[in-house]
C-alpha cells in the first residue's frame, strides 16, 4: 500500500507540473538541451555565459523544478568544480593579479575558472529542467526515436525496471546477515562475507535475467522489440524549437559583439 | 477429440542433480482445469516449462495441439497458443508501463499497434484493472503485479493457461479475486500450487508429483468447482 501512495504522489506531481515546457514532446526537450550544451561549451565571454546561466535559471523556473533537490544536485557538482576553481588561478600561467605567499594568482586562470563554473552550472541546470524531469520511460522512447541504438535504450529500460528489484534483494540479504549477528569490521571474515554478498547478487541477477528472457520468449519475443504508436510532434514543439534557436543565436551574438 | 497437451513418459533432470521427472505422463483436454502439487523441488514448474519448450525432455514426447513438438520453431508456435504465467511477477513484467507490458505479447503476435492498444484495454477491463493502465510496473503492489502478469498472458488470447503458484504471497481478498477471474475463463488450465484450498477451488482433477512420477489425486471437496464442470465429471 505504501507503494501505491508513492506512485500516486508521483502521478500527482507530474500532473501538477503540467506547464508550457512539460507539454513539449520529450524529443524536443532532449534536442534543445543538447543544442544548449553544445553552444554554451563553445562560449568564452563572461557576458554570454552569464546570459546562458540566466536562461537556464529561467527555464528551470518555468519547468517548476523542485528547488531543494535541484540545489542539492547543483551543489554536489559544484563540489567538484570548487576544487578546480581554487586550483586554476594559481596553476594557469598569465598576468599576475595577486600573490599569496609563494603562490601567484593569474587573471587568465581566474577567468578560466569562472567560465568553467558558469558553463557547468548552466548546462546541468538546463539538463535538469528539460531532461531531468522526464519519466525514464518517456526519456527512453524519445532517445529511441531520436536514433539512439535500441540496445542502449533497452539497457536504460531494464536498468530502470530492475534496479529496485536488485536493491530490494540486496537489502533482504543484508537484513538476513544482520539477523545472524553480522557486524562489518576490518577483518578477513567481513571481506569474505561481502564477497559472498556481491557474488550472490550477481548470481541472482543473472538467474533473474534468464527468467525474464524466458518469460519474454513465452510471449513471443524473437529479438526485436515491438513499439506502440506514439504521438507525433505538435505545433508548439515547432514554436519552442524556433524560440530555442533564436535564444541560442542571441547567445552567440552577445559572445561576438561584447569582447 | 485430440487433447491440447500431452506429455508422454517424459524424463528430465537438471545437470549434476538427480533426475526430477522420471516418466511423467499428463493429458490436458479442452476446457479442463488440472492442478499439480508436490514437494518443493519435485518438478512441478519443470513440467510447465517442458510444455512450452523452455526445457526439453531427455526422453519422452511433448505433444501440443495435436503435433509432436521437438524444435524451437515448433515451440514458438506452441507459446503463441499456450500462455505461461511465471511464479515471480518481477520476472514477467519488464516494460516501463502496464500498457506496454500487456501490449508486448499481442505486438509480438503481429497485431498492429492501434489494435494492440484496444486488446490491452479490453483485457484490463475484463480483469477490472483498467485503472492501472498507465502505471509504472515496478511501482505496483504485489497483488496488482500478479493480476497484471496474468493480463499480459491473457492479452495473447491463449487456448491454454499454465499458472505457476499464482496464489503465492497474495492476501485473501486478492486470492478470492484471482479464483473468480480464473473460474470465469474459458481456457484449459494447468495450475501449480501448494495451497490445497486454492487448488480445490480452481481445479477438478489433481495430480501429485511424487518421486518423479504423477499420481492421480481426487480432491475431497469437488463441489468447489463450477457446477457445469461437476456435471461433466459425473
Image (cartoon, coloured by chain):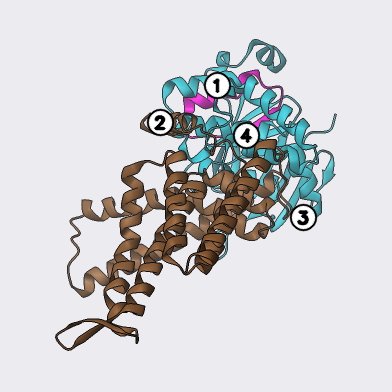
**Which is more foreground, mark 2 or mark 4?**
2
- Quadrant (top left, top right, bottom left, bottom right) of the C terminus of chain B: top right
Please state the chain letter of the residue tagged with numbered disc 2 in the rendered image.
A
Mark 4 to mark 3: distance in Å?
29 Å
Q: Mark 4 highlights which residue?
A: B99
Please state the chain letter of the residue tagged with numbered disc 1 in the rendered image.
B
Q: Which chain is cyan?
A: B
Q: Mark 1 highlights which residue?
A: B179
Instruction: Answer whether residue A256 is magenta in the image.
Output: no
**Which is more foreground, mark 3 or mark 2?**
2
Viewer can see residue B49: no
Q: Colour of chain A?
A: brown
Q: Which dot marks residue A9?
A: 2
Mark toward the start of the polypeptide (3 vs 1): 3
Segment tinted magenta in the rendering: B183-203
Question: Closest to the observer: B53 or A34?
Answer: A34
Question: Closest to the observer: B122 or B53?
Answer: B122
Mark 1 to mark 2: distance in Å?
31 Å
Please state the chain letter of the residue tagged with numbered disc 4 in the rendered image.
B
| Residue A219, x across and y down, in percent | 69, 43
Mark 3 to mark 1: distance in Å?
33 Å
SS state under label 2: helix
Amino acid at each position: 500500500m505504501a507503494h501505491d501512495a508513492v506512485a500516486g504522489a508521483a502521478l500527482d506531481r507530474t500532473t501538477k507540473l503540467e506547464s508550457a515546457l512539460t507539454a513539449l514532446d520529450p524529443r524536443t526537450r532532449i534536442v534543445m538541451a543538447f543544442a544548449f550544451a553544445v553552444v554554451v561549451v563553445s562560449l568564452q565571454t563572461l557576458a554570454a555565459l552569464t546570459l546562458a546561466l540566466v536562461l537556464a535559471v529561467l527555464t528551470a523556473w518555468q519547468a517548476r523544478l523542485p528547488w531543494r533537490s535541484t540545489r542539492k544536485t547543483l551543489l554536489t557538482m559544484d563540489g567538484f568544480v570548487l576544487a578546480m576553481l581554487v586550483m586554476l588561478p594559481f596553476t594557469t600561467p598569465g598576468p599576475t593579479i595577486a600573490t599569496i605567499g609563494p603562490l601567484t594568482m593569474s587573471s587568465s586562470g581566474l577567468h578560466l575558472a569562472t567560465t568553467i563554473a558558469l558553463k557547468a552550472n548552466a548546462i546541468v541546470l538546463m539538463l535538469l529542467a528539460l531532461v531531468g524531469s522526464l519519466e525514464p520511460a518517456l526519456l527512453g522512447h524519445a532517445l529511441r526515436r531520436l536514433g539512439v541504438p535500441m540496445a542502449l535504450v533497452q539497457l536504460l529500460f531494464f536498468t530502470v525496471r530492475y534496479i529496485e528489484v536488485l536493491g530490494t534483494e540486496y537489502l533482504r540479504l543484508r537484513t538476513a546477515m544482520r539477523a545472524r549477528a553480522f557486524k562489518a569490521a576490518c577483518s578477513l571474515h567481513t571481506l569474505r562475507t561481502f564477497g559472498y554478498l556481491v557474488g550472490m547478487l550477481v548470481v541472482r541477477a543473472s538467474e533473474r535475467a534468464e527468467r525474464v528472457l524466458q518469460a519474454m520468449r513465452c510471449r513471443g519475443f524473437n529479438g526485436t522489440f515491438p513499439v506502440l504508436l506514439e504521438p507525433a510532434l505538435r505545433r508548439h514543439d515547432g514554436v519552442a524549437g524556433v524560440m530555442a534557436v533564436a535564444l541560442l543565436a542571441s547567445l552567440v551574438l552577445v559572445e561576438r559583439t561584447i569582447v | 477429440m485430440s487433447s491440447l497437451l500431452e506429455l508422454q513418459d517424459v524424463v528430465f533432470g537438471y545437470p549434476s542433480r538427480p533426475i526430477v521427472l522420471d516418466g511423467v505422463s499428463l493429458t490436458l483436454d479442452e476446457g479442463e482445469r488440472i492442478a499439480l502439487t508436490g514437494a518443493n523441488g519435485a518438478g512441478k514448474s519443470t513440467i510447465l516449462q517442458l510444455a512450452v519448450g523452455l526445457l526439453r525432455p531427455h526422453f519422452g514426447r511433448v505433444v501440443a495441439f495435436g503435433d509432436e513438438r521437438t524444435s524451437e520453431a515448433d515451440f514458438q508456435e506452441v507459446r503463441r497458443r499456450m500462455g505461461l504465467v511465471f511464479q515471480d511477477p518481477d520476472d514477467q513484467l519488464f516494460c516501463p508501463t502496464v500498457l506496454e507490458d500487456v501490449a508486448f505479447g499481442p505486438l509480438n503476435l503481429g497485431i498492429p499497434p492501434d489494435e494492440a492498444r484496444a486488446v490491452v484495454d479490453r483485457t484490463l477491463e475484463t480483469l477490472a484493472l483498467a485503472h492501472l493502465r498507465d502505471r509504472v510496473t515496478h511501482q505496483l503492489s504485489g497483488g496488482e503485479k500478479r493480476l497484471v502478469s496474468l493480463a499480459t498472458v491473457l492479452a495473447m488470447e491463449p487456448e491454454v493457461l499454465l499458472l505457476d503458484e499464482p496464489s503465492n504471497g497474495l492476501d485473501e481478498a486478492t486470492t478470492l479475486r484471482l479464483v473468480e477471474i480464473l473460474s470465469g475463463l474459458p481456457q484449459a488450465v494447468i495450475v501449480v500450487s501448494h495451497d490445497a484450498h486454492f487448488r480445490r477451488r480452481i481445479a477438478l482433477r489433481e495430480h501429485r508429483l511424487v518421486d518423479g512420477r504423477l499420481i492421480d489425486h481426487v480432491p475431497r471437496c469437488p463441489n468447489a468447482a463450477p457446477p457445469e464442470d461437476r456435471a461433466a465429471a459425473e
